[in-house]
Image (cartoon, rainbow, N blue to C red):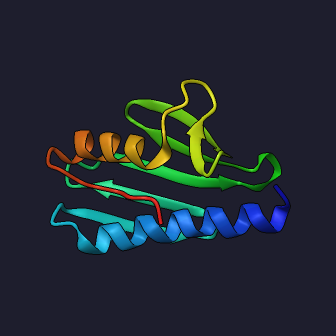
């Protein structure tokens, strides 16, 4: 994947996260600074989603741990376990919010 393809796909993922948070009823504050999204929950815990252009990855830091995702066969997949990015983010956010939060691929 070229740098341009990576940035297009990765930015679409961040935009999908932002859009999903607009539609959720959970109390989640969103802050974007460049290639970094910070989701802060009512209990003050955070999830950080950031782009890693040199590695062509998206990283998640959550209470559950740190995870790296690469675009493989049309989806962002965890480099260790193969979990799909948006389903994993849904799980982590739901755990930290204490209520359902859903993220979907663009």
Quarter containing the N terminus: bottom right
Q: Nearer the viewer, residue 20 or 41?
A: 20
Q: In the picture provided, is 83 more to the left or to the right than 80? A: left
Residue at horizontal 43%, vertical 50%? 86
42 is higher (above) or lower (below) than 17: above
Q: In the picture provided, is 33 more to the left or to the right than 89? A: right
Residue 88 percent across, percent down from the top left:
40, 40
Residue at horizontal 49%, vertical 71%? 15
Residue 60 percent across, percent down from the top left:
52, 44
28 is higher (above) or lower (below) than 70: below
Q: In the picture provided, is 29 more to the left or to the right than 89? A: left
Residue 102 percent across, percent down from the top left:
28, 55
| Count of picture labels | 0
Q: Residue furthest top?
A: 81
Q: In which quarter of the view is residue 36 placed?
A: bottom right
Residue 14 percent across, percent down from the top left:
52, 65
């Amino acid at each position: 994947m070229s740098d341009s393809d990576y940035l297009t796909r990765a930015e679409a993922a961040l935009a999908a996260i932002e859009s999903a948070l607009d539609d959720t009823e959970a109390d989640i504050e969103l802050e974007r600074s460049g290639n970094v999204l910070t989701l802060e929950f009512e209990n003050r815990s955070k999830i950080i989603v950031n782009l890693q252009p040199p590695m062509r990855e998206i990283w998640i830091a959550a209470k559950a741990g740190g995870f790296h995702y690469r675009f493989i066969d049309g989806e962002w997949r965890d480099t260790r376990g193969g979990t799909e990015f948006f389903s994993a983010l849904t799980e982590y956010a739901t755990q930290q919010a204490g209520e359902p939060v859903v993220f979907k691929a663009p």
